[in-house]
Amino acid sequence: MLAFDAETTRLLEASYQGADVGMRRRASFDAVDPRPGETILDIGCGNGLLTLELARAVGPGGHVIGIDPSADMRAAAVQRCADLDWAELIEGRSDALPLADGTADKAVSVQVFEYIPDHAPSLSEAFRVLRPGGRLTLSDVHFDSWVWFSDDPARMNRMKAAWDSHAAHVDAPARLPHAMTEAGFVVDRVVPHTTCDQVLKPDGLANLLIHLIKAYAVSEGLVPADEVEAWADEQTALAASGRFFFSLTQFVVSATRPV
């Protein structure tokens, strides 16, 4: 398991509010298309950044429910949304949503389904809690879309393979349209959002991933620590010499529960 120390937590917060992750979050927000007065579920809401933005969009006549199994994440989301009475944070899992049938107009889940081994129960739950005509938006990374330059491509491939093991499905976006159709949804849109950087930004996605991959690969014993450090040092050196290149694509899949 990846442990989040104080430095990693600080980096996560900075990166989540940085331009790279902010634009990815906006891609999901735009797909949801929140309207005043709607009830929207944020499944796997984490620290509540998207929950807050959705709540602002639906206004006091609406209702946004953030759902997450992590007490620490919910605590951060509660604090972030404290001024909006119509934003509610509750404990729950995607495959056992603590909500009545037909609760919501829309539901969104960002980078959750790539960690779920069996998508069917969670999709069935989303179908259940949405009203007829309701919209489901799922946003996940396709890790096979990774392009990350290195003068040592074999080592880079070992690092990427180590990180691949942290997710249940590195190709979740390719699986989701069919799985959503099988669950009864009508899929009508798949939109790619690519983060592409030639600069290693302190608040950027690439810098965040370097720190997370380092910690994960070492803690899980997947790559020797000296090799991990050499990989990270190379990326810093490439950036300093103007040779850094990183690209990764997240896909936003939208579907409707038929009337």
Image (tube, grey):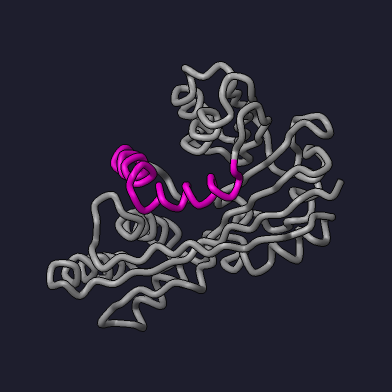
Q: Residue pushed farthest right? A: 259
Q: Is residue 13 magenta?
A: yes
> Does residue 137 appear left or right of residue 163 in this picture?
right
Q: Going 36% across and 44% down the picture, which residue do you hit? A: 12
Instruction: Evaluate whether residue 148 shows in this view.
Output: yes
Residue 162 figure quarter: bottom left
Q: Position of residue 44 (x, y in %)?
A: 59, 41
Q: Which residues are magenta?
A: 5-33
Q: Going 67% across and 31% down the picture, which residue do you hit? A: 38
**Main secondary structure along the magenta-highlighted residues:** helix
Q: Position of residue 100 (x, y in %)?
A: 81, 29
> Does residue 1 appear left or right of residue 204 in this picture?
right
Q: Nearer the viewer, residue 207 or 21?
A: 21
Q: Residue pushed farthest front? A: 36
Q: Nearer the viewer, residue 4 or 259?
A: 259
Q: Position of residue 128 (x, y in %)?
A: 82, 41
Residue 133 figure quarter: top right
Q: Is residue 115 magenta?
A: no
Question: Count the marks: how many?
Answer: 0
Instruction: Evaluate whether residue 71 shows in this view.
Output: no
Q: Nearer the viewer, residue 243 or 170?
A: 243
Q: Is residue 64 placed above or below 250 in the rendered structure?
A: above
Q: Is residue 86 placed above or below 143 in the rendered structure?
A: above
Q: Is residue 8 placed above or below 199 in the rendered structure?
A: above
Q: Residue pushed farthest left? A: 241
Q: Going 65% across and 26% down the picture, which residue do you hit? A: 37
Q: Position of residue 220 (x, y in %)?
A: 45, 59
Q: Going 48% across and 61% down the picture, which residue do you hit? A: 193
